[in-house]
Image (spheres, grey):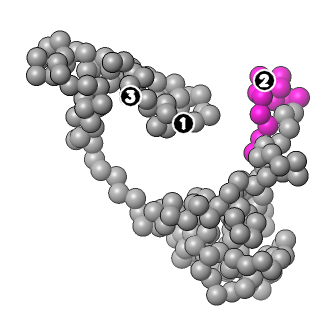
Amino acid sequence: MRQDRLALEKCWPTKNCWFRLITTLLGMCVVDLQRVYRNKDPQYNDWDILKFADYIAADLQKVEMRQSSAIILNHKHRLKRILGKDGNMCSPVTKTQRDKGMEVGNCIVANCYMCKKYEPDYKYKKTSWQCVDCGIPLCLKNRAGKRGRERSCIEEHLYSADPLIRCSIAEKPIRFPAHKKHRST
């Protein structure tokens, strides 16, 4: 009954070494605390680590997702990673990256098509996601409420009445037309 029973690293998979280290330390703390409780009070002797972890987390404040964030999670299946010409999600490793010990290059990114409507030309938002159906690059992050936006990028793309914006097979222009850009006041 050790930390591997908690399997926090499997619950929160990541490539970020620091997040993984903190996750491992959190798991170690929970196991250590369970052992302290088990040795101090016989009531906890028959509790397994999962029940004890639930007991610890029971008083944590419940964080409710904003509706728009929940909508993005509901639409995430409509997005896929942008792939390069060779079919990979990452670019080849550069010499500098190789010298630093990296084995994988940067993710393939593009400017979010919907952000082009709201952001100035020099502040386009990069994304590594695209629409499954039409291949338009779209943000996974919800930017509703910023710069006059009423919806997230994916919501606006899926539900807009404008043929230039909505999901369709029709090819979209690389530059967002100036007359269609949103002017923030």
Numbered disc in front, either 1 or 2: 1
For label 3, the residue is: 6
| Helix, strand or loop for disc 1 | loop
Crowdedness near tag 3: few (<14), some (14–19) or many (≥20) residues, C-alpha within 10 Å: some
Residue 106: where, in percent of width, then height?
A: 77, 41
Question: Which residue is located at x 62 percent, y 34 percent?
Answer: 15
Numbered disc in front, either 2 or 3: 3
Q: Nearer the viewer, residue 128 or 54?
A: 54
User: Distance between the Cα atoms at labels 2 and 3?
Assistant: 33 Å
Residue 89: where, in percent of width, then height?
A: 76, 46
Instruction: Answer with left or right where residue 154 lies relative to residue 29.
Output: right
**Would residue 51 be counted in the magenta stretch?**
no
Crowdedness near tag 1: few (<14), some (14–19) or many (≥20) residues, C-alpha within 10 Å: few
Q: Determine whether 115 is above or below 163 in the image.
A: above
For label 2, the residue is: 100
For label 1, the residue is: 13
Instruction: Answer with left or right where residue 169 lies relative to residue 114.
Output: right
Amino acid at circle 2:
Lys
Specify start and end residues of the magenta stretch as a single range: 95-107
Q: Nearer the viewer, residue 76 or 1?
A: 1
Residue 116: where, in percent of width, then height?
A: 73, 70
- The reply to whether residue 9 is visible in this rendering is yes
Question: Where is the N terminus found, in terms of image quarters?
Answer: top left
Task: Say which label, 1 or 2, has the lower sequence index.
Answer: 1
